[in-house]
Image (cartoon, rainbow, N blue to C red):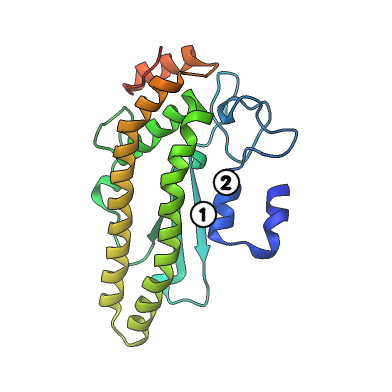
Amino acid sequence: MSCLRRDFSHVTPASMMAISRSHLEGTFMEPRWGAPEAFWPTPCMHDTPQSGYHSAASFVVQLRAEMPPLLRQVYWASFSNPCCNVFKPFYLHGTTIPRAYAAGTSTYSADSPWWWANRLKLLCDLNYRAVNPSVRNVFDQTERWEIDRQQSVEAEALGDVKAGRDADAVALLQKFTDENCARVGKEYQTLNQTLPETLSTAGVNYLYTDYLKDWTSQKGVPLPLP
C-alpha cells in the first residue's frame, strides 16, 4: 500500500510494473543480501524453503471504458517474478496468443517461453546482485519500446475502428502482439545462454542451493549449481 500511495496521483501501467517489482528498496525492510533472501513480505516475492508464497507470475491490466471493445482491455503479462522478467501486452478481443506462448508443461521444456522466463528467475536468484542488472538492462528497454509503440499502434487501430475497418484493426494489434512476443522470445533465449557465463565469473551467492537443487531436479531445469 505504501508503494501505491506514493504513485497514486499518476498511476500508469509502467508505475504498476515498477510497484510489482518492489522489494521495498530504500526502506529498513529491503532484503539485506538480495531479493531472493527477504525476511518480510514484499510485492515481488521470491520462494524460499521457509516461505509458502512466491510470485508465480504477475500482470498489469489496463481498463479503458472509453475505448471500443477491441482496445478496452490490455493484459500486460510477466511470467515468473517481475523483477527478473518483462511485461508483454496482449489484447483480449479479436487477437490470438502466439502458439508458443499459449502452451505450457509442468516440467522443463527447452522450447517453452514460460520456462525460459522461469529459468531466468532462477539464474537471477543464484546471484541477484550480479545477474539482475543485465536482465533489467535488456527488459527495461523492451518495455519502454512496447509502451511507446503501443500509443502509435492503438491510434492507428482506433482510426480503423472508427472507419468501420475492424478487421484491419485486429490485424494491426495482432502484428503488434506477435512482434512483442518474437522480440521477447529472442531476449529470453539470449539471456538464458549468456547469464550462466556471468555466474561462472561472479560465483553463486545464494543461501538455499540445496532447496533449489531438489526443485530443479524434479522439474528438469538445467542450472549451473555448485
Q: Amino acid at mark 2?
A: Ser
For residue 80, say whether it is visible.
no
Residue 183 % position (x, y): 30, 51
- Mark 2 closeness class: few <14, some 14–19, many ≥20 residues within 10 Å: many
Residue 199 % position (x, y): 41, 23
Left or right: 112 in relation to 133 = left
Residue 3 % position (x, y): 69, 49
Element at label 1: strand
Q: Is residue 90 above or below residue 39?
A: below
**Which image quadrant: the C terminus?**
top left
Q: Mark 1 — residue?
A: 60
Q: Is residue 7 above or below residue 192?
A: below
- Residue at the (35%, 36%) spot, across then down: 191
- Residue at the (33%, 88%) spot, across then down: 163
Residue 36: which quarter of the image? top right
Residue 119 % position (x, y): 38, 31
Q: Is residue 139 above or below residue 39?
A: below
Q: Residue furthest bottom?
A: 163
Residue 10: which quarter of the image? bottom right
Element at label 2: helix
Q: Amino acid at mark 1?
A: Val
- Mark 1 closeness class: few <14, some 14–19, many ≥20 residues within 10 Å: many
Residue 35: which quarter of the image? top right
Nearer to us of marks 1 and 2 is 2
Disc tally is: 2
Whole-Å distance between the Cαs marked 1 and 2?
A: 9 Å
Q: Mark 2 — residue?
A: 20
For residue 92, say whether it is visible.
yes
- Residue at the (39%, 66%) spot, across then down: 149
**Which one is nearer the viewer's eye here, 41 or 21?**
21
Q: Earlier in the sequence, mark 1 or mark 2?
A: 2
State if disc 2 and disc 1 touch (CB < 8 Å): yes
